[in-house]
Amino acid sequence: MKWPDLILSLSLVAKVESYNHIALRIRGGDLKAKRTAAIVAIGLLCLAITVIINLLHKDVWDQNEDLLKEEVLSLGASVETVNLREITPFKWDVAYSFPPYTPKEDIYKTVGYKWDRVSETVNEGMDQIVFMKDGKVVCYIYGYPENKGYGLSIQTDQYKGAASFLRAEDGLIFKVKRSNGIVYLSN
């Protein structure tokens, strides 16, 4: 073999070996990329599951509001009065009724702490009632009776801040009225 042919063949072998090295490196890189992609996918799946669980999870005050709604809406048509303590399917010791337009900060001050779901009423016809047990919110009623299917009106001469309140041991007899498919409870 002549020198130019030998150099050419060595050059081709070097290029083939170099190409194989690059190909192996790319294949190894693909494996690394696949592993990284799998880890990222698992992480995103875990994050998605966590978000879905949090979206579907209801706080205790929302669960109890749903239970109270069921109790109120299941009152028979002949029922004219009801003891509030008997139809609340949760334990409570005080209930605060906030007038329309009460600022969030006043609500937080009245109940003693901030929780994540308080809203300000934006109209005269909205309910905003907080039931508490041992200093913690256990039920939060907020919104228009027409949207909830029931309304609860607490009127007392006891006040804490802007809110009228009643205790579980107070006289809790409420009148039951029905109008346009809505059940209204008022004391």
Image (cartoon, rainbow, N blue to C red):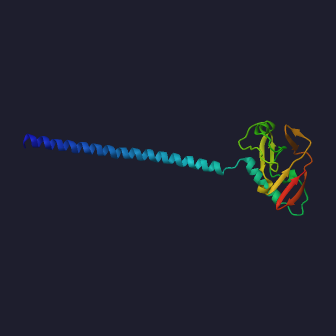
Q: Specify the farthest residue to the front.
A: 123
Specify the quadrant that holds the N terminus: top left
Q: Position of residue 65 (x, y in %)?
A: 77, 51
Foreground: 121 or 95? 121
Quarter of the rendering containing residue 107: top right
49 to the left or right of 164 = left
Q: Is residue 110 above or below residue 64?
A: above
Q: Residue at x 62, y 50 (%)?
A: 53
Percent coordinates x, y for residue 161 in the rendering: 85, 37
Residue displayed at 60% across by 48% down: 51
Q: Nearer the viewer, residue 75 or 184?
A: 184
Asked if residue 180 is positioned above or below residue 26 in the image, the reply reads below
Where is residue 89 drawn, in percent x and y? Answer: 81, 52
Residue at horizontal 26 percent and vertical 45 percent from the top? 20
Residue at (69% x, 49% y) in the render: 58
Q: Position of residue 100 (x, y in %)?
A: 81, 45
Most extreme residue toward the bottom is 77
